[in-house]
Image (cartoon, coloured by chain):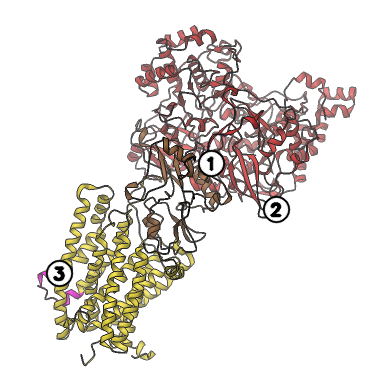
Amino acid sequence: MNLSIKNLITFKKTPLNLLVAVIGALLLAAFVAGAVMYFLHGHHAFNVTRQHPWGLLIAMYVFFVVSSTGLCIISSIGHVFGVKEFQQIGKRAIAGAIITILSGFAVIALEIGHPITMLIYNVLTPGLTSAIWWMGTLYGIYLCFILLEFFFLTIKVDHKWSKIFGIGGLLAGLAAHSNLGAVFGFLISRPTANGVFYPVYFILSAMITGCYLIYIIYGFKYRNNYPDHLKAMFLKLNKILGMLLGILIFFEAWKILTALYGTMPERAETIMYAVTSPNFLIGELLLGMLIPFFIILFTNGQAIKPMVYASLTGMIGIFFMRYDLVHDTLVYPMTMLKRSEYQLPPTLLHYFPSPTEMMIGFGGIGITILGLYVAEKVFNLDPDPEH
Amino acid sequence: MKVEISRRRFLQGSVALTVAGGVSMTPASVLASAAKVEDIGKTKIVATLCEMCVNKCAVYAHVKNGIIKKLDPNPYFPKSRNMLCPRGNSGLASIYDEDRLKYPLIRDGEKGSGKFRRATWDEAYAYIGEKLTKILDEEKDNRSTVAFCAGEGMAEHTFKNFYTGFGSAHFLNHASLCLATTVSGYSLTIGGYGQSDLENANYVIMAGANRAEAIVTPDTMDFFKRTKGRGAKLVTVDPRFTNTAAKSDKWLGINVGTDLAFVLALTYVVLKEGIYNKDFVEKHFNDFETYKNHVISNGYTPEWAEKITGINADDIYEVARDFMKHAPQSIYYQGRRTTWSKNDFQLRRAQAIFSALGGGIDIKGGICFGKKIPMEGHEVPSPIYDQSEPRIDSTEAAVVGGSGTWVGFRNKVLEGRAEYPIRALFNYKHNPMQNMPNSKKTEEFLKKLDLVVTIDTMPSDTVMLSDVILPECTYLERTDPAKVYGGIEPAIVQRNKVVDPMYESKPIIDIMRGLTEKISKPLFEITKKYDEEVQDAIKEDGEEATYEEFDLTLAFKQTQEELNHHAVSKHPGAAESLHEKGVFYPNMDKWFKKINVNEYEYYPESEKAYSVRNGKFKTPSGKIECNLSSLTKRGIDAMPTWKKEYEMVIPDGQFRFVTGRHAQFTQSGTANNKMLLDLVPTNYLWINKRVAARMGIKFGDELEVASSVGKTRIKAYPTEKIGLDTVFFIHGFGNYSEELTLAHNNGGRDSNIIEDSIEPMHGATCLHDTIVEIRKV
Amino acid sequence: MARYGMALDYKSCINCRACESACKAENGVLPGRDNYRIWVGQKEIEGQFPKLSISSLTYQPSQCQHCDNAPCQQVCPTNATYYDENGVVRVNPEQCILCTYCINACPYDARYIDDRTVTVDKCNFCSDTRLANGETTTACQATCPTKVRTFGDLDDPNSDISKLLEKREYKQIKEHLGTKPKLFYLL
């Protein structure tokens, strides 16, 4: 551990480093500004409405915790399941998992109206039938586990305990994350969300997100110039990711087909809207799935550098998946009746995030960048020499 | 106090009927102020009456710490049937409106500049007195140079006592802008406007009347519980699909202004087919054969009417036959705001005759006349001023009644055709700037006057063009004259003060008392100067005795509570009941019963006044009058007749404008009400969807609506609920007054665009005879 | 203990919206587009002038359905939404964390954020106001010109609502979701 201020503020002033530094600083500033707006105006600073009560912040929270869970799962391939090539990424991945979930918590703290009340009544009057209660509680446990895991990986190195907490973290993460899927899956009022799909899909997309983030984190660290032991890991990761993307495409295709089939009211209309929107076609499908998938497919899983770039588009795609998950779930109004003579008949709802939501939501990425930077500086995230 | 009937007033006859005559044997409990602030924290409930519209529904006001927290329905009034509409609920926003008039104001700048200076009540009274004496001196005591106008209300009468004592010939109110034609059309035909018994009617034609939105008690509440296949059939005839249309069995989208052709065709069918109530017609119709021949020989067939009204002949046959099948429990509903077009009086006559052909007059389920409960009168001086000239607007229409023809009056003054100058106006809670068509002319008219005194609660457009503004308190802050509401289930009701008047506002009776104390004597001096009769009388009886007849203060000596107590003094327990419950009718304690959680019984069935005429209607012949030949010499058709000139051509690309109401607003009076604007933030122009699409107009687009007299701006509401050549928006919006912070410039203003023509019978306004152009801005 | 419900003779509704203003005044609901506990729904009319479908335009007064199996209650992480002992579904603002999950979960759009407490609010059959004062009607029921609503105890066979539901057929909204609503629309 190196906690000196000097160490913290010195870095190589390469153009890429500077660019990331500036972006990180801007995002952090945006987060702070957004937080100030929120404290001044409350929910009125957001473009969420009675009919569309969740928006970008929920999407970004999901984005962060999906990232965290994904990193946790991918890291566990090495130090929980013992796949050798993946053991080297363990510490950095767990650090990333911790940082991303903290970023997520920072964002959700500004979305939940009364976070302190939440801490109190989560314990005093737990809502055991609530997926949010389970999700929140399990993520709390998950965070404790991965923090301990990280402690035993870097500060007080103890492989037995790091493995125990690694397994605990993985299980809590999987449980928490599928419960996050269930937050949507349990909505009986929302036919496109209701059902088994989201809890399972969330785990799948978390794994994909984990892969993308490993590419990006290592791509940035090694400037696309990898030692052999990393190349070996990436080649395996390519195969895993290819398979995961294949499954995801298969899942999505059947979700869409079953929802459209028979044109059930509400459900079919919602999915039709969802799959014809540019968010889905360009964001989710092209950037999030097809580009990485085809690179892996056409290079027989041999491409590493292109996959780093494809992971950037992949993460943009993942963002749209999270955004659409929230928006598409809520897009169909719960009543299609007019409430006043002087209005247009209700249609699918419109939502676009407000500046404050964007500042808080995207500003959260600044927290992640800062966190990763600090972690790199303070801890040794590379494999221990004796390993 | 007892005012002797003088020679003079005896000659004048019963011009002034009037309430009051102070008695002070009143129990202290009754006189005790209803507004005394109760123990802190406790809720006090005061029974009073609503004034958000004309219906006067009974209300319970919940008061806590001197503040009215909530208005609830008070179940005791048979007319209001235990309910409060959205406006009734929003009375809270009316009393606590920050824009209210708070203290007397005197104009301090150009007229219309909106500049006023705050004055004390005494200053304001003195200012009025000074101006008035000067005007009357210059006009040699021609009292009619001062006109009086008033909005509808329980205290209108108090103000009218001032007018009566003042001696002007000019009283103007909403009648010629509202219901003059239907009231007289029915009265002259069947001997009364009557009350449609919608609790028992089985078949009702509502043409132009929109009872689901323009709420009238008890009609609205009685009827819509029974529509939609639950006992009463409803045929709605309206150029737009209203909420009433939504409740009907049949809706006929008629061409604007052609209802008379529709009714004549209905009449044709029943006469031709002989399906009318022959027994009733034989006993009760006067000149039936003449009318029958008139209708048949003129060929008013459904086929003929189809071309004019746009309603299928088949529908007309069906409605005519159904109507008679259900008769006598069939009603052609009278309607209320019936100032539509030139043929309006004849239309109401035709409706009344058609209704009577089924025999549904003075009978359960038909049009009933009901009973009144007698009240004690109160005499006030109604002196004769020899210099006072007759009304100037009586030449403007065939029969101009006591409430005048507002537009006829205004236009005659503006056009310089008046026989003598009109120089001042006393205005009680009336807003001619908004309620009369052609605002430009009204503005010019108000500016032309030397003195405009307006008594009101809100800074309306008319208030802003006044010289002196006297702030009245709202209805929740005053006790108003007790009044009897006659009908099938009659009752006396009384508005009780709930809380003390806010700011420096006062009830009208206090204002009248203060004003008359200041100006009565000086005005009498003018009369003395010019009135030879008065000069003679002084010589004969002495000045004091003569003045007593002219003493304007006499009508306002007592408090309203005292006057009310006297008015019901013949009914034991009435004063107490009016104070506690706001309502009284004989045997109320016995008959008033709760039926279920929502409904009450007021009178046992056997005591309801369905039939009261005993076969003798209140018309000259005692029968249903088909043929009013006496009208021909005044240029009015003796029988309803369709004329080619009634068929208005709407040029391509233009529209005929109609106006109306929603349940959330009462004309311009509620335009600044926060609670109501929360329900409906502004008015919109209804335009046919297909036409709008062709013109590229989308929902919410800003439009300019222009006619030959002016223009206004409003947002678009494309809808299929209106025909291709018609547009509509509700009245009361687009206020000029900047002092109305919510209503100022909010929405479209119909008084800017409606042309100011009047119909020939009473000089009532034709509000639906305007052609407009529309463009996107 | 009582089990409160409401029957709505909705065909009598004239869409005057008195219930909305009475509710707002009674319960201090703030003005604003999204702030309402109750409302009157209507469909856009079908057909073209002058051939319009009267039956396509009915008015549907609505509010919280006080489901016996309330999705909003199930999803609440802190049990802020609870069933009162009289069956009224209520929110305790003390416990509400404003995650708005319940707003998403309610199939009836019956919930919104109250800016006074900055927590989720909804119709509670005037529990805090009228019922607390011993009254037996809700503000919306009492004020209604055509007496659409009958509020009362479903467990009391002699209550007006029980007698109504015994006689009259009714429909319920989205009952296929298994919410067991306690608002009954009389046919």
Tell me the chain of label 2: B
* Residue B449 is inside the magenta segment: no
Tell me the chain of label 3: A
The colour assigned to chain B within the rendered structure: red
Question: Hey, which residue is sitting farthest bottom in the picture?
Answer: A386
Callout count: 3
Q: Amino acid at mark 3?
A: Met
Bounds of the magenta span? Answer: A294-308
The colour assigned to chain C within the rendered structure: brown
Where A368 sits versus B92, above or below? below
Whole-angstrom CA distance, mark 1 to mark 2, is: 27 Å
**Which residue corresponds to mark 2?**
B39
**Which residue corresponds to mark 1?**
C143
The colour assigned to chain A within the rendered structure: yellow
**Which residue corresponds to mark 3?**
A243
Mark 2 burial class by Cα count in 10 Å: few <14, some 14-19, many 20+: few
Q: Quadrant of residue B132?
A: top right
Q: Are marks 3 and 2 on the same chain?
A: no
Q: Which is more toward the observer, C125 or B523?
A: C125
Q: Amino acid at mark 2?
A: Asp
